[in-house]
Amino acid sequence: MSRRLAATLNLTKTWALLLAGAAVLGGVGWLINGYRLFSIAFFAGLLAGIALYWYADRALLGIVRAKELLETEAVPLFTTAERIATRAGIPRPRLYLIRDGHPRILSAGRGGGGHSLVVTTGLLATAQPAELEGLVAHEISHSLRRDLLTQSVAAVIASTLLEISRAGGWFQRALLFVFGPIASAIEHALLSPRREYAADSAAAILCESPHGLADALLRLEQAGELVSFSGNPALEPVYAVNPYEPIGLAALFSTHPPTADRVSRLRALDPDWDHEKRAPTEPSLRK
């Protein structure tokens, strides 16, 4: 699928979701008080959808408690982001930091010029230059395809539904039983695992090599195996690699393909890669 077609499809899916949400609110208003309340509820839902379209990235940044990153705090990251964004023909994403030792990277925004990239202190401390370049290129590739818009809107809506269920007091479990599958269905309906494969391939082109990203994916996967990560599982789509252990509620929100498959596809892009030499460092590929 071409980048332009993917961007158009993502825009269409996102607005279809926002309009459907407004229609649901309008339907509830109709059931309560007929056309008058329908028009009010539908208009309110439409305004909320427009606000979500423009400010979903800010909502996500608030949820993960990211703070704007100063260039003096991470010069290599700023240099890498500027270089990859220039190659992609878009402005450099705004950079944010989460003070957490667990290595993670995520993105939010509308795509194109509206893009925020978030890293943790753990990633900055452990990622090699080629790995950091690969991850940044992967996130910028999502921006080019407007995957970020769909991911951000879906994640905010799904996480909001989960938080509503958790505020139910004695009825929390019952509400979670209802809203959890709905939130999961929204994400799976909008987000295909193929988006990760496409972003990986595009990142390899931007970096002129697939191996930096492949090594980075393995590093993030292995970090998740060593250190458990907790948080709102509805945010899973915005991460480069799923940081949640796929059990319980988190299993409902897994939209990423297996990391081993992604790494295998990336390695296959370089036919001269020495598989025998690198295989011992990649145990997850042998699962």
Image: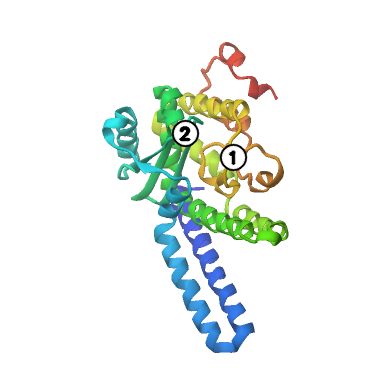
**Residue 115 screen position, x and y as percent:** 38, 48
Direction top: furthest residue: 277
In this rendered view, identify the residue nearer to me: 132 or 99.
99
Residue type beneath disc 1: Ser
- Dot 2 surroundings within 10 Å: few (below 14), some, or many (20 or more)? few
Quadrant that contains the C terminus: top right
In this rendered view, identify the residue nearer to me: 73 or 57.
73
Q: Residue at x 51, y 66 (%)?
A: 18
Q: Residue at x 47, y 67 (%)?
A: 49
Q: Which residue is mark 1?
A: 230
Q: Which residue is mark 2?
A: 100
Please report whichever mark, 2 or 1, sits nearer to the chain's N-terminal start.
2
**Residue 17 screen position, x and y as percent:** 55, 64
Q: Secondary structure at mark 1?
A: loop
- When asked about the image quadrant of residue 93, the answer is top left
- Side (left or right) of 258 relative to 217: right
- Dot 1 surroundings within 10 Å: few (below 14), some, or many (20 or more)? few
Q: Is residue 170 above or below residue 240?
A: below
Q: Is residue 86 above or below residue 179?
A: above
Q: Is residue 240 above or below residue 50?
A: above
Visible residue check, residue 268: no
**Residue 169 screen position, x and y as percent:** 66, 60
Q: Which mark is residue 114?
A: none
Residue type beneath disc 2: Asp
Direction front: furthest residue: 170
**Residue 268 screen position, x and y as percent:** 56, 26
